[in-house]
Image: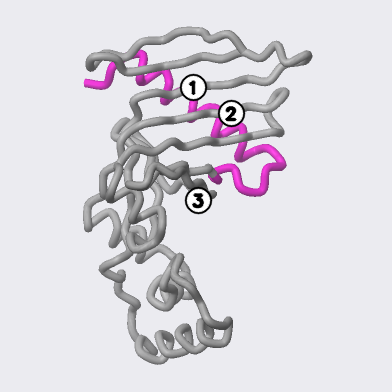
Amino acid sequence: MTDALYQDALNTFTDLLEQAKRSPDPEPTAMTVATVGRDGRPAARTVLLKAFDERGFVFFTNFSSRKGRQLAANPQAALLFHWKHLREGVQVKIEGTVEPVSAAEADAYFASRPRGSQIGAWASLQSQPLASRELFDRRVADVEKRYEGQDVPRPPHWSGFRLVPERIEFWYGAQFRLHERQCYERIDGAWTQAMLYP
C-alpha cells in the first residue's frame, strides 16, 4: 500500500507534469540527472523521463556511459525538473536510490523507439573519445547494414534505471524571491511533509 503522503507527492508531480505538457515548454519531460562517481566528483546531464509510478522515475541510457558507470559505482542520484512557463517558475527535485529496470521493461521501451535511435544505441560508444564524425557515421552505416530487413534487438549495454525516491521537493517561484517550498521526505520508512524557508 502506497503511503498517503507519498501518493500526495506523486499526484502533485502528475498535475504539474500535465500542466507542463500543455505549456510552451518544448521538452516537458526533460530532467537533469546528477550523479557522483567513486572519485566523489559530481556530474550532471539532461535526459528524458520515460515513465513514473509509485515504484519510481524511469530513464534509459547506455550502461557503459559516464552516468551508467557512476550509477553502477554509487547508485544515488538526484533529478531536477525546471518548468519556467508554470506560474513564476516551478522546480521539482527528486533524490533517491537507483536500480536497473527489468529486462522486459527495457525490451519493451527499446522496441518502441524510432529505428534510427535503435541503430544509434548500437553504433555509439557513449562517452568514449571519438576520433572523427566520419568514424561515427561509418559505425551507424555498419549497424544499419547488419540489421537491414530485420528488427533491431536491444544492445546488452543499453537499459534503464528507476530512481526510487527518498525526497521530493516542489519549488514554486514568487516575486521578490519569496518562493514556496514543499518537501516530502522518507525518514525511517515513513513519509513526512514540511514547508521550507525559500
Whether pointer 3 and pointer 2 mark residues with C-beta atoms closer than 8 Å, the reply is: no
Q: Which residue is mark 3?
A: 47
Could you tell me which secondary element the residue under label 1 belongs to? strand
- Please state the horizontal and vertical placement of residue 137, each as a whole percent of the image: 53, 85
**Residue at x 29% of width, y 14% of height:** 187
Count neighbours of disc 1 (C-alpha within 10 A) and say few if under 14, some if 14 to 19, many if 20 or more.
Answer: many
Real-space Cα separation, disc 2 to disc 1, in angstroms: 8 Å
> What span is in magenta?
1-30
- Which of these two is toward me, 106 or 11? 106
Other residues around mark 3 within 10 Å, as few (<14) / some (14–19) / many (≥20): some
Asked if the residue under mark 1 is in contact with the one under mark 2, i.e. CB atoms within 8 Å, the reply is yes
Q: CA distance from mark 3 to mark 1?
A: 19 Å
Q: Which residue is mark 1?
A: 169
Q: Position of residue 39 (x, y in %)?
A: 37, 47
SS at badge 2: strand
Indicate the amino acid at tag 2. Answer: Gln
Q: Residue at x 68, y 29 (%)?
A: 86
Task: Give me the disc on residue 180.
Answer: none
The verdict on residue 79 being magenta is no
Residue at which label 2 appears? 91
Q: Earlier in the sequence, mark 2 or mark 1?
A: 2
Above/below status of 89 relative to 197:
below
Q: Position of residue 101 (x, y in %)?
A: 26, 49
